[in-house]
Image: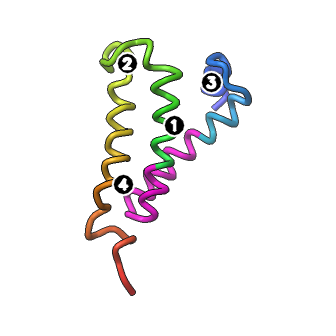
């Protein structure tokens, strides 16, 4: 966490360790919510925000291809998160169960 915090600070973010922790928590929390199919709009938001920041703060200057450190992979994750949110979490999602 310390190393990532220093990298965040080198990109101009204040409180790098805190921001790194929040980014990790957001991506993990969003992923768990997606797996469960619970609170899908929130899950999408928890993944979308760090991906937008990653694209514009880190990857955009390297071009589009992941092999060159570009934004291809974060853009893919962002697209999937938004796509699932806009489409439907599916029939097995906890959100769709009625009790």
Which residue is denoted by mark 3 in the rendering? 8
- In which image quadrant can residue 62 be found? top left
Which residue is denoted by mark 1 in the rendering? 50
**Foreground: disc 3 or disc 4:** 4
Above or below, 96 relative to 73:
below
Q: Nearer the viewer, residue 12 or 17?
A: 12
Label drawn at residue 72: none
- First in sequence: mark 2 or mark 3? 3
> Most extreme residue toward the left, as rendered?
91
Left or right position of 75 against 33: left
Q: What secondary structure predominates along the stretch shown in magenta?
A: helix
The question of residue 72 being in magenta is answered with no
Query: Start and end of the magenta stretch?
Result: 23-44
**Foreground: disc 1 or disc 4:** 4
> Most extreme residue toward the front, as rendered?
86
Identify which residue is drawn at 39% across, 31% down. Answer: 74
Q: Are marks 3 and 1 in contact (CB under 8 Å)?
A: no
Q: Nearer the viewer, residue 40 or 4?
A: 40
Percent from the top left, x then y, of residue 41?
44, 57
Label drawn at residue 85: 4
Query: Between marks 2 and 3, how big is the CA–CA gap?
Result: 17 Å
> Most extreme residue toward the bottom, as rendered?
99
Identify which residue is drawn at 28% across, 69% down. Answer: 92
- First in sequence: mark 2 or mark 4? 2
Above or below, 41 relative to 17:
below
Q: Secondary structure at mark 2?
A: loop
Which residue is denoted by mark 2 in the rendering? 70
Q: Are marks 1 and 2 in contact (CB under 8 Å)?
A: no
- First in sequence: mark 1 or mark 2? 1
């Amino acid at each position: 966490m310390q190393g990532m915090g220093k990298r965040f600070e080198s990109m101009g973010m204040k409180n790098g360790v805190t921001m790194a922790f929040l980014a990790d928590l957001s991506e993990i929390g969003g992923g768990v919510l997606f797996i469960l199919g619970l609170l899908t709009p929130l899950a999408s938001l928890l993944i979308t925000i760090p991906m937008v920041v990653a694209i514009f703060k880190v990857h955009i200057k390297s071009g589009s291809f992941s092999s060159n450190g570009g934004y291809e992979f974060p853009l893919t994750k962002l697209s999937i998160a938004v796509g699932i949110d806009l489409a439907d979490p599916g029939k097995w999602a906890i959100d769709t169960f009625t009790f």
